[in-house]
Each structure stands twice: as structure tokens, then as C-alpha cells.
């Protein structure tokens, strides 16, 4: 027996603990003195990345499920008329213009729910709060579905008429010799109404912000209106360089695998870039935006009591909304590049 063991035995003996009892005590492991149970101050949940649907097609509340929209043709403000007065007593010429009501929105209904039993509520360990988690998860399902619908509108070349181009080969922005600066300026000038927002997929943004010509164009100066040039190109610096209000990056991800297969996380917004006009608070008299989300009512969550299920019943957590993702300006207010990176 070592000196240390002799010392331990002597100390235990002084407290009336014999050799047999000491051997038993010293044999206990950490796992023998603790029973695993749920942590009361931590639960793991992975929220999706920030959603940008409201920044691309802002929500506009409407009083009816469907309605017509008045519109002046885009040529109204481009006509050149003979404005010379014929004589001091002559009558000025009259301008001619038209108004249409061809645009009609119609909302669709969207709803999801989850059942939470009263047994689940009563039996949940801290920090779990089943009803709150159900609300969060149901809401996320709906918001992700809306994000996809808006992405399908904003990155759909059919909504841009002739104002769209698919980049390929040496023109793609993950190729160092391409010229994204010129492409963006060309797109802005191609629109009749100047875009104020760039909507860009995260994969494209990564390549664009690190492109040699972008770095030279933006970081080759000593200072900006915001102060010293930062070490990296950020969204606001890029927006300022092109006279835009916002650069909005689609970073949300979704499971692209078929049901039952191993999960595969993919970017929802893809590899496109749109330059569009966004007016969050339109004038009732006139607007010139790319599009809106017309919403009838509000996005609301309800608790619906159901005592038929199980022994003690429970509640349904139901979230619903009625929306129409609607293109108004189209090619007049936007330009789309697809396949911007490989």
C-alpha cells in the first residue's frame, strides 16, 4: 500500500470508517452518483435564417378577397405632344391618356395546425412549453412556405418580360474576369422606373462581394458617406455604391430531399439576382412598385379547444392567413439575372 493510500485510510479511520466501507466509497464513479434527466434551462431548437419575403413583396392590407387595380399605361409619362401655342388667342392642345383596370388580385388561403394534448402540457419538464413551441413551429412552416412563394415570384423570368438574362460561362460572377459592375448598371438603366432594391441569393452574394472588380470599385477609396471604408464589402456599402436603398440577401434554407430520405439542406432563393422597385408604403393615388402581397385580414394564431381526443383532450394551435403575391410593375420596375454563379 502506498503512502497516499495509508494516509487516506488513516483519515477515514479517524471518522469511524473501516477498511471495507472505505473500499466501497472509493469505488463510486461520477455516473453512480447522478441520474440523467432533462436540463431545466436549455432546449435545442434551430431557427431558420432570416426571411426576406416582406422586404421583397411588402404586405398591403386589403378589405376584400379580390379587387381590381387601376393603372395608367407606362407610356403615359413618355408621350411627346405638340405643345406650341398656335397664337396669343389660340387654345392649347389637349393631352390624351387612358386608365385601365385589367389587374385583378385574388387571395388564397393558407393554414396549418398542431394538436397539443393537456397531458403533454401537464407532463412537460422545464423548460419545455408545448403550446409555445407548437406556435413557433407552425408559424415557421407557414413563413417558409411564403418565403418560397415570394422567391418564385421575384426570381421568375416570366415576370420581367424582356428585362431578363441568363448568365453563362465567362459572364458569371464567380468568374474573376467577368464584369458584374457593368451588368448591374445595365440592369438598372434598362428599367423605366429606377430600381431601389437588389434581391440576391446568398450563393451569389458570396461570389459578388469577393469579386475583384467589386473590390476595386468599392474598396479603392479612402472613405465613404458612412466613414472609413470597411475591411469587407457589406450590404449597405454596396447599395450606396449603386444608389440603391437596400441589398436584400436570401439566406433561408429548406430540406430539398424527398420525404423519408436523409435531410439535404439547400438554399431556397437559388442563384439569381433581381433589381426591383420596392415601395413599402404606397401612395393611394399612385404607386410604381414591382409587386405587393395583398393580405385579406391578418396572419392570426388561434387556440381551439378539443376535448374529444385522448383522455383529457387538448388544444389545436392553428395559424392562418389569406395572401396574394402579386406582380404590378414587372419589367417596368425590375430586371432579373438568372444563373449568376455556377
Image (tube, rainbow, N blue to C red):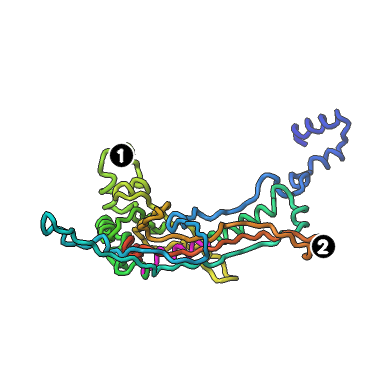
Mark 2 secondary-structure assignment: loop
Judge whether residue 167 can be spotted in this image.
no
Depth order, front residue of 298/315: 298
Q: Residue at x 74, y 54 (%)?
A: 121
Which quadrant does the N terminus fall into? top right
Residue located 72% across and 49% down the image: 38
Q: Residue 246's spot in the image, x, y percent? A: 37, 50
Which residue corresponds to mark 2? Answer: 311
- Along the horizontal axis of the image, is 238 left or right of 256? left
Stretch of the chain drawn in magenta: 144-157
Please name whichever residue, 10 or 302, is drawn nearer the observer in this view of the structure.
Answer: 302
**Circle 1 is placed at which residue position?**
225
Q: Secondary structure at mark 1?
A: loop
- Left or right, residue 135 beside residue 169: right
Write down the quadrant of residue 154 in the picture.
Answer: bottom left
Which residue shows up at 74% across the image and 50% down it? 125
Amino acid at each position: 500500500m502506498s503512502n497516499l493510500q495509508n494516509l487516506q485510510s488513516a483519515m477515514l479511520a479517524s471518522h469511524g470508517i473501516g477498511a471495507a466501507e472505505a473500499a466501497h466509497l472509493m469505488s463510486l464513479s461520477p455516473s453512480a452518483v447522478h441520474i440523467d434527466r432533462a436540463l431545466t434551462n436549455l432546449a435545442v431548437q434551430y431557427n431558420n435564417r432570416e426571411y426576406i419575403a416582406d422586404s421583397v413583396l411588402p404586405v398591403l392590407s386589403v378589405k376584400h378577397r379580390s379587387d381590381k387595380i387601376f393603372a395608367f399605361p407606362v407610356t403615359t409619362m413618355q408621350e411627346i405632344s405638340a405643345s406650341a401655342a398656335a397664337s396669343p388667342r389660340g387654345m392649347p392642345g389637349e393631352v390624351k391618356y387612358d386608365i385601365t383596370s385589367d389587374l385583378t388580385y385574388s387571395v388564397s388561403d393558407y393554414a396549418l395546425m398542431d394538436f397539443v394534448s393537456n397531458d403533454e402540457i401537464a407532463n412537460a419538464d422545464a423548460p419545455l412549453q408545448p403550446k409555445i413551441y407548437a406556435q413557433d413551429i407552425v408559424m415557421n412552416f407557414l413563413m417558409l412556405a411564403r418565403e418560397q412563394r415570394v422567391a418564385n415570384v421575384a426570381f421568375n423570368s416570366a415576370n420581367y418580360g424582356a428585362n431578363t438574362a441568363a448568365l453563362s460561362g465567362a459572364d458569371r460572377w464567380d468568374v474573376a474576369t467577368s464584369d458584374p459592375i457593368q451588368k448591374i448598371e445595365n440592369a438598372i438603366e434598362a428599367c423605366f422606373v429606377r430600381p431601389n432594391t437588389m434581391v440576391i441569393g446568398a450563393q451569389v452574394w458570396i461570389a459578388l462581394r469577393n469579386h475583384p472588380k467589386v473590390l476595386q470599385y468599392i474598396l479603392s477609396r479612402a472613405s465613404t458617406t458612412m466613414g472609413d471604408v470597411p475591411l469587407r464589402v457589406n450590404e449597405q456599402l454596396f447599395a450606396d455604391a449603386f444608389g440603391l436603398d437596400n441589398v436584400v440577401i436570401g439566406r433561408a434554407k429548406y430540406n430539398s430531399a424527398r420525404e423519408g430520405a436523409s435531410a439535404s439542406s439547400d438554399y431556397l432563393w437559388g442563384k439569381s439576382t433581381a433589381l426591383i422597385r420596392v415601395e413599402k408604403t404606397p401612395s393611394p393615388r399612385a404607386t410604381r412598385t414591382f409587386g405587393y402581397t395583398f393580405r385579406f385580414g391578418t396572419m392570426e394564431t388561434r387556440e381551439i379547444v378539443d376535448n374529444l381526443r385522448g383522455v383529457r383532450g387538448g388544444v389545436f394551435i392553428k395559424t392562418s392567413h389569406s395572401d396574394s403575391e402579386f406582380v404590378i410593375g414587372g419589367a417596368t420596375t425590375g430586371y432579373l439575372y438568372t444563373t449568376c454563379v455556377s
